[in-house]
Structure formats: structure tokens, C-alpha cells
Amino acid sequence: MNERVTVIGGGLAGSEAALAAARLGVQVRLHEMRPVKMTPAHRSGNFAELVCSNSLGGEGELQSKGLLQAELRSVGGAIVGAADASKLPAGNALAVERDEFSARVTAAVREHPLIEVVEGEVEAVPDGIVVIASGPLTSDALAADVARVTGSERLSFYDAAAPVIAFDSIDMDIAWRAGRYEQSADYINCPFTKDEYLAFFGALEQARSHTPHDWEKLEFFEGCMPIEEIARRGIDTPRFGPMSPKGLDDPKTGRWPYAVAQLRQEDREGRMWSLVGFQTGLKWGDQKAVVNLIPGLEHAEIVRYGVMHRNTYLNAPLVLESTLQLKADPTKLVAGVLAGTEGYLESAATGWLAGTNAARLALGLQPLTPPAESMLGGLTRYLASANPKGFQPMNVNWALVPELPAEINEKTGKPRKRGKREKRPVMFRRGLNAFMTWAQAEAGLTVTPPPVREPEAVGAEG
């Protein structure tokens, strides 16, 4: 048995799936509807185009995303490899130059001799072994057919992107470059006094936002909440969230400001910077007025406005196995946001597993699930076993993997408490070792231990 694998979607999940399957010697046909048919969020026909943040999450042994990055690096994951090659300075986050990153992935896919790219919309799930990685903006026709194949209702939520600012329009006499708690100065910080914050908050409350059609239900994902929705939860909510001043000493005062808006580098030359945590669906005129109330951004030139779009995903616990196969049809696998994940890295990781398992099916082998101690194994097990009632897409986090065995205090005879900085590096090494052992021994893959950032260099940014 040596069938072709079909992949639907050329985003992060689909690109990774196609390359993972091809790496195992299987012919792949990759369908991508762009540029024949565009989406409300994309700008090009390139693969793995980033439409929201340009960060793939925090790096290092204290970060759950850092473990997932290391797992993918160990097996030659294409997305994390392209991210490493197009990395921008962003403290302890793996941020990339968008166009360079997408160009690298596009070249890897189009130049692979075992991958055939077919442009145009797929309206129904084809026969055979298929990875459905059509993404959060799956077309209505395909989404309806996926719902038919899975026998499950389709769910959706709203996602938003943040505004991007031209660097030469930022007033650096007001703003300053720094990282939290004296980390590398990769962020631009705009400080608020209390009065400035209250004026900003008042304008944010009054600003006009996206008005959905009557048939749309605004159901936001908690991990990518628009700034205006955060503000609706209380006047102090933004400054205890994305506008937190913690660890940022204003060089003019030597103290933390009342609140801070941070910007992160978007391009290699540093000409464009995005507002961190400022995803928004505000109308563009109101969006500009609100941004101009941020100290240092009074004359900001917005080179790309924040936008909101509907994301589509399945109720994973009802329809998916931990191998990412559909319960209703094991020859069909789902990856990315459609599978119930949230985040670029999570999409790539599930794409890698779906592509690997699709290739194994084509080669007559059994699909596999990574070990529970690994971050990818923890994520896919969660997708298959979570409570389906009120299910929402999931980012990776340390709660997805088993806790460490308790250590008994010899003096008290009670379990000894261990802080995050002590136990997470141990969980990181345990997970990475388990993943690499599994990948080599069970999946038969070539494994290369990846370089890992020391935990002392890791903070909360990213």
C-alpha cells in the first residue's frame, strides 16, 4: 500500500503536514485556494502567511512553547526551521520577519520533488488519505462538507490582529527601548500617567467596533482577545494584562509607569512595529484616534490596521482521536485551528503530526501519538479527551503534561513545594527526552538534539 496523501490548505499546518509526509517518501498533493480565492485576512498567495502576531511564542526551558519548539526542531520541523532562519530580536520570543518566513516555507514546499501544488478552492473532502488543514478561514462550502464528514456541528469564534506602526512616526523622546526586568531591549515602551491612561480608556470605551451580521455570534477566544473587549471587563483590566508596566522602569522617572503599551519589531530593518496585545476590531478611523492617544504615538503612522475575522474550528473531543484522525473516518486527519488548536506553533505541530501519521497510513503503518510527557503529546491528548461542552481552542501550556513526582521533605515527611523556575526546566528536559526517544524508536525518524536556551535568560515576554 503506497497511496498519495492529499493536504488541504497551505497555511502553517498544511505546509508542515505536506513537508512531513513528503519527508517520509510519500507523494503529496497540496491544495491551496489562494491566490485564486483570497480570504478577508490574507494579503498574498504565499504559504504560511502570518496574519496576526509575528511571534511563535516564548523560548527556553521555562516556556511551554519553548518545549514544543524544541520537539519540532529535534525532528526537523519545517515551520520552526523557517522561523529560526528569519528570526527578529524580540527578547525571549521567537518573532519572525513575516515575508521572509513565508517565502522560506513557500520555497520549501514548491521546490520539494514529492509535493504537487494545486491552486484553487476545494469544496468537498476528497477520497483517500487526507489532511484537512484549511485553517481558521475555511471556505463555507468546505466547512459544510467537513461538518458532514465528521457528523459534528461547526463552531466558530472571532480573532483579531493588532495595528502595525511605522518606526519613524514613533516619538522616541517619550517612548524608550527595554525588556522587562532588564532583559534585552527588544521592545519599544510607551508610558502612561494615570490621567493619560484614563483618557485612553475613555476613548477606547467610546470607539466603534466591528458590527456583526445578525446571524453572526461574537464568541472571542480568550487567548487573542481584542483590546476593546478586554477593556469592557473593567477599567484596570488592560493594565493588568497587555498594558502591564511590571518590570519596566521608565528612564525618566526610574519607576514603573501607571501603564505601558509595548511594540514589537515586525520586519528585519526595524521600520515596522506592532502593538503587543492590541488585537482589535475597531473601525479604522476610531482605531487611529485611539492609537494616537498612546504617549509617543500621537503622530503614529499606521501601516496596517488591526482587523477582525471569524475563525472556524471543530469540537475536537467529539470528532478527533489523539492521532488527529477523525473518529468517523480514520483516513481523514485534521490539523491546525480547525482541529481545535490556537497559535501558530500549535498549528505547525499538529500539522507535523497529521502529515507524519497520514504518511504512515499511506505506507501501511499504524498512526502514532507522541508521549504524554511531551508538549505535542499533551496537546493532542487534550484535544481528544477534553470536555466537549463549551470547548474552545487550546494553546500549549504546562497543565497539558503530567506533574513531576512529589519530592518528600525528609524533615517534615511532607511533599516539598517546588517553584516554577525549579520544576519547569525538569519538565522541559523530561518532555524533550521522551519525545526524541519516541520519534526515534517508535516513529523511526532521524532525531537531532536541539540547542536550548538556559532558563536564566527566560522571562514573561512573548
Image: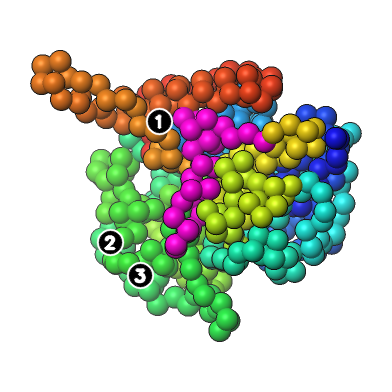
Q: Which residues are magenta?
A: 367-395
The three-letter code of the residue at mark 2 reads Asp
Where is residue 146? Give x, y as percent: 70, 61
The three-letter code of the residue at mark 3 reads Arg
Give the residue at mark 2.
236
Dot 2 or dot 1, earlier in sequence: 1
Q: For marks 1 and 3, give the CA distance.
A: 32 Å
Mark 3 or 2, closer to the camera: 3
Q: Nearer the viewer, residue 426 or 454?
A: 426
Can residue 293 be seen here? The reply is no
Q: Is residue 127 left or right of residue 145?
A: right
Give the residue at mark 1.
62
Secondary structure under tag 2 reads loop
Dot 1 or dot 3, earlier in sequence: 1
Q: Is residue 124 left or right of residue 296?
A: right
Crowding near the residue tagged with mark 2, few <14, some 14–19, many ≥20 C-alpha atoms within 10 Å: some
Identify the disc placed on residue 246: none
Where is residue 108? Give x, y as percent: 79, 36
**Residues at discs 1 and 3 in contact (Cβ within 8 Å):** no
